[in-house]
Amino acid sequence: MFISTRSRYGLRALVQLARNGQGSPMSLSGIATEEEIPIRYLEQIFGRLRTADFVRGRRGPGGGYVLSREASEISLLDVIRVLETEFFHTNCSLQCPDFLEQKNDAGNKISGCTREDKCPTKKLWTDIKLLCETYLVKNTLADLSSGSLEME
């Protein structure tokens, strides 16, 4: 599992909005300064967050961004799924000599592990993925912003 800077920065920026509430909008430049995030990178991140309807922008004087819904309604897993392209991808399969990449009859690339049915570590990776997903879906942006993340 790999969490990119896109998710780390995105969550930090969303915490700023959550702490601000749904009151006055926050400018991207203000968030970028406060969180020490490059503004151009933050613009790309907010493009994804806006498309996924986590944030909405307000134009004009005093404009900026606010959360589209309550922070308690936004799970951390939802945010990470929007910002990550291959979250919970098991890198070992790409390095494993038994990993196979082929083309099917339609010419599309398919991949898989020839040892999947007998791999002794498959359950380990599946269980870790489930534990992480459960933790991230249970905890919300409100929990993160208040520092009250829960394990159980």
Image (spheres, grey):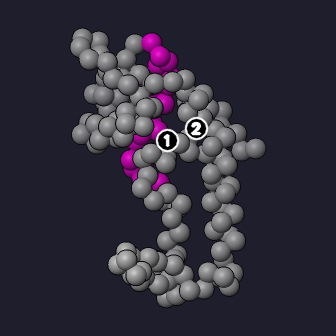
> Where is residue 40 shown, x and y percent of the image?
24, 40
Q: Which residue does the image show at 45% across and 59% down from the upper left?
A: 86
Residue lying furthest right: 152
> Where is residue 128 shown, x and y percent of the image?
66, 62
The relative height of residue 146 versus residue 63 in the rendered view (above or below) is below
Q: Which residue is mark 2?
A: 75
Residue nearer the viewer, 43 or 116: 116
Can residue 113 be seen here? yes
Q: Which residue does the image show at 35% across and 78% down from the upper left?
A: 107
The relative height of residue 15 versus residue 112 in the rendered view (above or below) is above
Q: Which residue does the image show at 61% across and 81% down from the upper left?
A: 116
Q: Quadrant of the C terminus?
A: top right
The relative height of residue 26 versus residue 82 in the rendered view (above or below) is above
> Where is residue 62 shown, x and y percent of the image?
29, 12
Magenta span contains residue 21: yes
What's under tag 1, amino acid-wise?
Answer: Val
> Where is residue 39 shown, x and y percent of the image?
26, 36
Q: Are marks 2 and 1 in contact (CB under 8 Å)?
A: yes
Q: Which residue is mark 1?
A: 79
Predominant secondary structure, magenta span: helix
What's under tag 2, amino acid-wise?
Answer: Ser
Label 2: few (<14), some or many (≥20) within 10 Å? some
